[in-house]
């Protein structure tokens, strides 16, 4: 737990989890690694055919640890911190005479780069040279890649090769090229020096994937852009069957589904969000009631957050809160790593679990829904949540801040990222009152549902 006044986006600990699967991960969604791990992964690079296809393991040059200098003893304090705001992991060693840090991060603007940097700062003069040890077990080998060492390039080592087995018979073996800087065994801040030590970077590059939208979304986007929509898209979309039991007023998971049959995870309830399939409040509630009772307690982490969104949509904050607490059972300390299952089994750093919880907060608490007419809102908070603020929502070239507390909603267009962005307004329901939202002007009104839209002339 963070203390009063501490940054809630930073998770700190003085020791690492005993299970290495629960160590923090740093990634920019293209390139990523688990800190202190031997492997890194690249988006779209897979090895193995058929059911054996898996994300290819690359050797990680960032497998390095900062260790205390010999003789430092127990006077040093070691702290590990995952900074979710900057997307970096920081290990610090603090003593009476010096401070040393090791930061690992995936570069945000250079997605092909992972970086590791070490700094030393002096806290007292006249204490002589300060040396920290750097332990690395990097080996340029992989079970999934045929790798060869190439010529050095401007002080960096070069590794290249290809995957061993294509995903499809006769398919291409993906190529990889990696440059990295070897880690020295130690770094020293000489007596009289004050400057931080240089960065120790590592990088990799490869092909990317094209991380397919739904047919309906593609058709709507094409129409918005003035592009022709192939008839086949809509024909296929209209042909997708959604079973419905008119007598009982709910959607069976499949033809022949019997009430009470266990289901693995949220599926039918996704019709309400994020699809969104047109549902009356009665049918939406029935779907939630039916499947909440029979969803496996051993199901994956994103399930309960999707139920929570549904109950918030129906303004039943009490039931939503209980389900959000269930989803938090999949979070492991100290770095808030999500596991696929509540008992810690299954995939770790389970992105769908994290994403589900974030969507419950963003789309559940605010009631945000993106429609062709505008961005609708209908805020509601579970007990114990006094208010919510969301900053930097991008809409029609504008940046919006949205917050509410104690029965009041506040909207502000904080910036116009696009010079041609249209003016916006808020239409409140059920009164249909329209409030202009000029840039830099904060507008508050009693808590209400409504829609943010282009200003009507």
Image (spheres, rainbow, N blue to C red):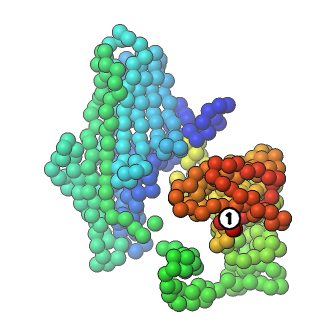
User: Along the horizontal axis of the image, is 285 left or right of 299?
Assistant: right
How far across and down, in percent of the image, does residue 50 sit?
40, 74
How far across and down, in percent of the image, does residue 78 sit?
48, 27
Which quarter of the rendered picture does the C terminus lie within? bottom right
Q: Is residue 170 above or below residue 165?
A: below
Residue 409 showing in the rendered view: yes
Which quarter of the rendered picture does the N terminus lie within? top right
User: Along the horizontal axis of the image, is 267 left or right of 81?
Assistant: right
Residue at position x 56%, y 48% in the image: 337
- Residue at the top extreme, as displayed: 126
Quarter where residue 70 is shown: top left
Residue at position x 35%, y 76% in the image: 168
How far across and down, in percent of the image, does residue 298 sit?
65, 61
- Residue where numbered disc 1 is placed: 455
Residue at position x 31%, y 49% in the image: 203
Q: Is residue 148 above or below residue 127?
A: below
User: Along the horizontal axis of the image, is 429 left or right of 82?
Assistant: right
> Around disc 1, counting alpha carbons within 10 Å, would you say few (fewer than 14), some (14 to 19), or many (20 or more)?
some
Q: Nearer the viewer, residue 146 or 441?
A: 441
Quarter where residue 449 is shown: bottom right
- Residue at the front extreme, as displayed: 457
């Amino acid at each position: 737990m963070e203390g009063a006044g501490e940054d809630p986006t930073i998770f700190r600990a003085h020791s690492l989890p005993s299970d290495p699967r629960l160590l923090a991960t740093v990634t920019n969604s293209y390139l990523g690694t688990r800190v202190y791990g031997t492997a890194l992964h690249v988006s779209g690079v897979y090895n193995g055919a058929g059911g054996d296809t898996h994300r290819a393991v690359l050797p990680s040059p960032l497998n390095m640890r900062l260790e205390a200098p010999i003789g430092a003893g127990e006077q040093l304090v070691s702290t590990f911190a995952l900074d979710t705001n900057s997307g970096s992991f920081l290990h610090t060693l603090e003593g009476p005479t010096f401070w040393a840090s090791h930061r690992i991060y995936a570069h945000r603007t250079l997605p092909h780069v992972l970086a590791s940097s070490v700094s030393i700062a002096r806290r007292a003069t006249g204490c002589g040279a300060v040396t920290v040890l750097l332990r690395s077990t990097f080996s340029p080998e992989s079970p999934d890649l045929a790798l060869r060492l190439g010529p050095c390039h401007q002080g960096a080592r070069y590794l290249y090769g290809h995957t061993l087995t294509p995903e499809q018979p006769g398919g291409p073996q993906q190529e990889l090229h990696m440059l990295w800087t070897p880690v020295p065994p130690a770094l020293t801040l000489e007596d009289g020096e004050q400057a931080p030590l240089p960065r120790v970077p590592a990088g990799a590059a490869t092909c990317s994937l094209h991380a397919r939208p739904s047919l309906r979304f593609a058709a709507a986007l094409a129409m918005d852009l003035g592009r022709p929509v192939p008839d086949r898209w809509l024909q296929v979309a209209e042909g997708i069957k959604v079973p419905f039991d008119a007598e009982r007023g709910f959607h069976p998971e499949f033809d022949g589904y019997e009430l009470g049959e266990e289901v693995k995870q949220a599926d039918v309830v996704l019709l309400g969000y994020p699809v969104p399939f047109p549902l009356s409040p009665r049918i939406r509630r029935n779907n939630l009631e039916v499947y909440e009772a029979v969803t496996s307690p051993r199901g994956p982490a994103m399930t309960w957050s999707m139920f929570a969104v549904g109950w918030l949509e129906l303004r039943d904050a009490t039931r939503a809160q209980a389900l959000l607490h269930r989803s938090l059972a999949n979070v492991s300390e100290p770095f808030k790593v999500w596991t696929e299952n509540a008992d810690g089994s299954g995939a770790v750093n389970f992105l769908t679990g994290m994403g589900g919880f974030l969507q419950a907060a963003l789309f559940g608490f605010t009631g945000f829904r993106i429609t062709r007419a505008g961005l609708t809102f209908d805020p509601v908070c579970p007990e114990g949540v006094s208010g919510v603020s969301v900053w930097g929502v991008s809409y029609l070239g504008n940046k919006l801040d949205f917050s509410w507390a104690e029965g009041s909603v506040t909207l502000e267009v904080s910036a116009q990222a696009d010079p041609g962005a249209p003016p916006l307004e808020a239409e409140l329901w059920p009164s249909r009152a329209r409030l202009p939202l000029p840039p830099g002007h904060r507008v508050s009104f009693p808590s209400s549902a409504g829609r943010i839209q282009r200003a009507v002339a």
